[in-house]
Each structure stands twice: as C-alpha cells, then as structure tokens.
Image (tube, grey):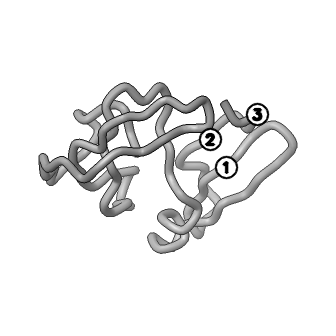
Amino acid sequence: MTRDRSQLINFVQKFLGTVKFGNDHVAKIMGYGDYQIENVTISRVYYVEGLWNNLFSVGQFCDSDLEVAFRQHTCFIRNLDGVDLLTGSRGNNR
C-alpha cells in the first residue's frame, strides 16, 4: 500500500474496498499500480487514501527476487547483488 499515487506506474483507479488499521481507522483502497525501484518492479501495490506510510508485504519483495533483512531498528530491501534499494525504520505498530 502507498499513500502517494504518483509513485505508481500503470495505475488502475478502482474502488477495491476498505482496510482497517490497529487504531480502528478505516481507509479506502482506491486502486493499484506498479512500484518501480531502479530496475525492479513491485506489482499490484494498492493506493490507500489517507495512509501516512507506505506498506508493502515481505512477499511482494520476495516475488520480485529481492532480499528482505530485518535488524533491531531497520529493515533493508536489497537486490541479489546486496545493494540496498530501500531502507525503513522498524518501530512499533501504530
């Protein structure tokens, strides 16, 4: 899921339902597209209105032949050459 629709290519605008977060906030899933990171494409990333952070599943990265590594405070997404494509802060669920 992403909050920034401009990050998605091949965007399909279509209401797909809602998602409920741990704080009981409900948001609309308003479509999907592909997310490009260098020469890697993550397919079918949902666009969610009002989302504060980008959310991806580990499976989406693995399906694109990427490595996901978790450390105490950071998550790394790497290509098979070990190059960091994305890093994220690993904190409490909010």
Residue where numbered disc 3 is placed: 92
Give whichever of discs 1 and 3 has the lower sequence position.
1
CA separation, marks 2 and 3? Answer: 16 Å
Is 94 left, or right, of 19 in this rendering? right
User: The C terminus lies in which quarter of the figure?
Assistant: top right
Whether residues under marks 1 and 2 lie with C-beta atoms below 8 angstroms apart, the answer is: yes
What residue lies at 42% left-to-right and 45% top-to-bottom? 19
Whether residues under marks 2 and 3 lie with C-beta atoms below 8 angstroms apart, the answer is: no
CA separation, marks 1 and 2? Answer: 5 Å
CA separation, marks 1 and 3? Answer: 17 Å
Q: Is residue 57 above or below residue 63?
A: above
Residue where numbered disc 2 is placed: 87
Looking at the picture, how far across and down is residue 13, in whole percent? 12, 46
Residue type at tag 2: Thr
Of the residues tagged 1 and 3, which is closer to the observer?
Answer: 3
Q: Residues within 10 Å of mark 3 (few under 14, many from 20)?
A: few
Residue type at tag 1: Phe
Looking at the picture, how far across and down is residue 30, in whole percent? 22, 42
What residue lies at 47% left-to-right and 38% top-to-bottom? 54
Looking at the picture, how far across and down is residue 34, in whole percent? 27, 55
Whether residues under marks 1 and 3 lie with C-beta atoms below 8 angstroms apart, the answer is: no
Give whichever of discs 1 and 2 has the lower sequence position.
1
Give whichever of discs 2 and 3 has the lower sequence position.
2
The secondary structure type at the circle numbered 1 is strand
Foreground residue, 20 or 80?
20
Is 10 left, or right, of 21 in this rendering? left
